[in-house]
Image: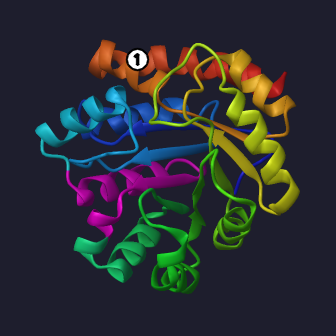
């Protein structure tokens, strides 16, 4: 799914509204290799304050899973940029795992990240995703053991998502040292591409991680903060930011 090195960008669907989300995706796709679209959720425990607020804004205006699917369909009708949905297990479970994966595939979703689904409990989900040829991505944290990294690598068909730091999402001033150690350890055992996220917000962060061996870098909170500030009028500012970040990828 990812061209190496890759810039992967994250925004929350429905923030500030679902029409703006489609405009934002079109803008991001000009410089982005993969768009990660968050399904708004009431208890996003892996996300820091910035993305929590984005979830609240999206839920407050009534964004539903079906709205996210419709938006992906409209986007994929006009773009070949891969789309990965990032969600928690509850919306998947409530819709029914097979129904969720089937509907996602039908609208053009390329891959799924279910943040709080442990790889050890994912057999049914993985079987369904394989049946529908849906790419899967699992997360590894700085304290993930080599044995568990192997499991995550085997279960991830698109790329392994390396969480760069201890804690939740959110822009940081510098890349955590734990990110570099995790990249080194993951490269010893993983065969899939490695994408690093959490805390990445600047072109220099991106280039440092790529130079350390990452195959892709995920930027989320820095973009969501732009949406928080400019609302529906964020399109141009988002495009400027991803163009700047892309320089960090291309060197």
Quarter occupied by residue 7: top right
Pick the residue in front: 93 or 27: 93
Locate the C terminus and report the quarter of the image it occupies: top right
Q: Kindly state the secondary structure of the residue where label 1 is placed.
A: helix
Locate the N terminus and report the quarter of the image it occupies: bottom right
Name the residue at 64% across, 72% down.
Answer: 155
Inspect this view and state whether residue 77 appears: no
Left or right, residue 15 beside residue 220: left
Q: Is 38 drawn above or below residue 225 in the view shown?
A: below
Pick the residue in front: 210 or 184: 184
Q: Is 158 drawn above or below residue 123 in the view shown?
A: above
Q: How is the image coloured?
A: rainbow
Left or right, residue 146 beside residue 45: right
Where residue 168 appears, as percent x and y from the top left, is 44, 36
Q: Is 92 drawn above or below residue 176 in the view shown?
A: below
Where residue 134 appears, as percent x and y from the top left, is 55, 72
Where residue 210 appears, as percent x and y from the top left, is 80, 32
Inspect this view and state whether residue 80 appears: yes
Membership of 77 in magenta stretch: yes
- Residue underneath mark 1: 226
Left or right, residue 207 beside residue 72: right
Where residue 171 appears, as percent x and y from the top left, is 50, 21
Quarter occupied by residue 191: bottom right
Membership of 244 in magenta stretch: no
Q: Residues within 10 Å of mark 1 (few under 14, many from 20)?
A: some
**Magenta-highlighted residues:** 64-92
Name the residue at 38% across, 82% down.
Answer: 98
Pick the residue in front: 163 or 205: 163
């Amino acid at each position: 799914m990812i061209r190496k090195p890759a810039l992967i960008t994250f925004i929350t669907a429905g923030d500030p509204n679902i029409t703006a989300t489609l405009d934002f995706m079109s803008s991001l796709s000009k410089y982005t290799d993969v768009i990660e679209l968050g399904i708004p959720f009431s208890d996003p425990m892996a996300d820091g304050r910035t993305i929590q607020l984005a979830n609240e804004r999206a839920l407050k205006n009534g964004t539903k899973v079906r709205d996210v699917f419709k938006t992906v369909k409209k986007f994929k009708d006009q773009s070949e940029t891969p789309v990965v949905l990032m969600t928690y297990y509850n919306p998947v479970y409530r819709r029914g795992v097979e129904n969720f994966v089937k509907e996602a595939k039908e609208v053009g979703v390329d891959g799924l990240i279910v943040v709080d689904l442990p790889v050890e409990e994912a057999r049914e989900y993985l079987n369904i995703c394989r049946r529908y040829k849906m790419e899967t991505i699992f997360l590894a944290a700085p304290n993930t053991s080599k044995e568990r990294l192997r499991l995550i690598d085997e279960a991830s068909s698109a790329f392994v998502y390396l969480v760069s730091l201890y804690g939740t999402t959110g822009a940081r001033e510098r890349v955590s040292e734990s990110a570099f150690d995790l990249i080194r350890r993951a490269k010893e055992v993983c065969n899939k591409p490695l994408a690093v996220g959490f805390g990445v917000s600047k072109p220099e962060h991106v280039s440092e991680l790529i130079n350390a061996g990452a195959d892709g870098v995920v930027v989320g909170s820095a973009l969501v903060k732009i949406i928080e500030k400019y609302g529906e009028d964020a399109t141009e500012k988002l495009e400027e930011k991803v163009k700047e970040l892309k320089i960090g990828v291309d060197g």
